[in-house]
Image (tube, rainbow, N blue to C red):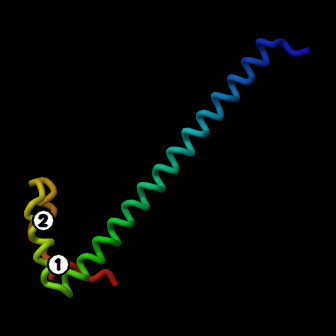
Amino acid sequence: MKDPQASLAQIEQQRARLQAKAQRIKAKMKVVERKAAIRRKIILGDLIIAEARRLPQIAVLLKEKIADLDERDAAVFDGWSIDNEPNSD
């Protein structure tokens, strides 16, 4: 018969390994989810820019929204316009 303490120690080691594995899997899932969210934002942005080229009222709305951004975010748009944005096709 196995020593109960040895059995318990073995089970606790297994549990620790499984918890570590679960954490690694969760971290990988989080990276996959984050990449998908970034990709959605890029695609959505491209669709909005395409529509803004087609519909002047959307271009105006985008300019207003960019003007409302905080200084750090707005700096990314310095010198940018819908007209000089390359097509993604």
Which percent across, then down, holds residue 13? 68, 25
Residue at figure coordinates x 79%, y 18% from the top left: 7
For the view shown, which residue lies furthest in the bottom direction? 54
Image quadrant in which you'd find residue 49? bottom left
Q: State the SS at label 1.
A: helix
Q: Is residue 84 left or right of residue 89?
A: left
Residue at figure coordinates x 17%, y 78% from the top left: 58
Q: Quadrant of the N terminus?
A: top right
> Distance of mark 1 from mark 2, alpha carbons?
12 Å
Q: Amino acid at mark 1?
A: Ile
In this rendering, is residue 23 above or below 29? above
Q: Amino acid at mark 2?
A: Ile
Binning the other alpha carbons within 10 Å of mark 2 as few (below 14), some (14 to 19) or many (20 upward) gives some
Residue at figure coordinates x 24%, y 82% from the top left: 51
Q: Earlier in the sequence, mark 1 or mark 2?
A: 1
Q: Is residue 77 left or right of residue 44?
A: left
Can you tell which mark lies on residue 89?
none
Q: Quadrant of the C terminus?
A: bottom left
Task: List the residue tagged with mark 2.
Answer: 66
Please state which of the two labelled residues, at mark 1 or mark 2, is closer to the viewer.
1
For the view shown, which residue lies furthest in the right direction? 1
Which percent across, then down, holds residue 74? 12, 60
Task: List the residue tagged with mark 1.
Answer: 58
In this rendering, is residue 7 above or below 19? above
In this view, the residue in front, 32 or 60, is 60
Which percent across, then down, holds residue 86? 24, 80
Which percent across, then down, holds residue 33? 45, 55
Q: State the SS at label 2.
A: helix
Q: Is residue 59 left or right of residue 34?
A: left
Residue at figure coordinates x 18%, y 85% from the top left: 55
In this view, the residue in front, 45 or 24, is 45
